[in-house]
Image (tube, helix red, strand yellow):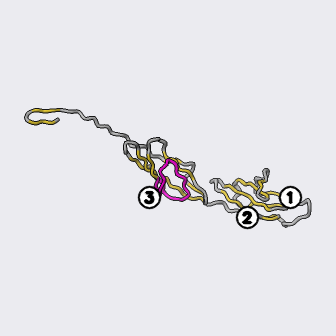
Amino acid sequence: TLTANSCSKTDTVRVRINPLPTANITAPRNYICVGDSVLLTADTFPKYAYQWRLNTNAISGATSRFLQVKAIGNYDVVATDSNGCVRTSTVFNITSKPNPSTKIDTLGPVSVCLGGSIALRADTLAKARFQWFKNGTPLSSDTNRFISALSAGNYTYKVIDSNGCSSISQPTTV
C-alpha cells in the first residue's frame, strides 16, 4: 500500500517461488576396479544444465547428465534449471578395489607322453568365477580352478572376484 496526501493506492504483486531442481547421483556401484571405470548418472530433466565436480573442483567439459569416472574421489553434480535455480547433489564417494591376483600352478611335470595330461590350478581366490583359455581361445567347459591340459599350447585364465574385478594370468606353456 502506498499513501501520499491522504490518498492511498493498493496493488497486488504475485511472487512465484520456484522449487530447487533435484540433484541426485546414481551408479551401479560406488567403486572402480584397477584400470576400470563406472558410469555416474544425474537425475533426468531435459532443461537442466549440469556441472560435475571432483573433490569440489569443476571437471572441464563434464556438463552432460552422465559421467564415466576412472579416478577415485568425491563426486557431486551441480544442477541448474531453466529458471536459474541451482542445487548441488550430495557427495558420491568412489573408492578403488584391487584386481585379484593370478598365477598358474602346474600339479606335476609340464611334459608328458602322448595321450597324457597335465593338471593346472588357478592359484587365486576359491570363491571366484574362472574362464580358462588355450592360445587365447576360451575353453568352454573349463570354468573351475583346476583343468587338465590335454594338448600343447599356452594356457591362461581369467578370474572375476565377487566385486566384479578381473585379471588375466600370465601364460603357462604346456
Q: In the rendered view of the protein, which quadrant contains the N terminus?
A: top left
Left or right of 151 in this view: 16? left
> Nearest the camera: 49 or 6?
49
Is 82 rendered above or below residue 103?
Answer: above
**Residue at the spot 53% in from the left edge and 56% down from the top edge:** 94
Looking at the rendering, the stretch of residues picked out in magenta corresponds to 52-76
For residue 7, above or below residue 105: above
**Mark 2: which amino acid?**
Gln
The residue positioned 78% from the left and 61% from the top of the image is 155
The Cα–Cα distance between marks 1 and 2, rounded to whole angstroms, is 19 Å
Picture quadrant of residue 160: bottom right
Q: Which residue is mark 3?
A: 57
Report the Cα–Cα distance between label 3 and label 1: 56 Å
- Most distant residue in the front direction: 61
Q: Residue at x 47, y 41 (%)?
A: 46
Which quadrant does the C terminus fall into? bottom right
Residue 90 in sight: no
Amino acid type, callout 3: Asn
Q: Which one is earlier in the sequence, the residue at label 2 or at label 3?
A: 3
> Where residue 28 sits: x, y (%)?
57, 48
The residue under label 2 is: 170
Q: N-terminal of the two: label 3 or label 1?
A: 3
Label 1 belongs to which residue? 150
Q: Amino acid at mark 1?
A: Leu
Q: Identify the residue at horizontal 23%, vertical 33% (top origin).
A: 12
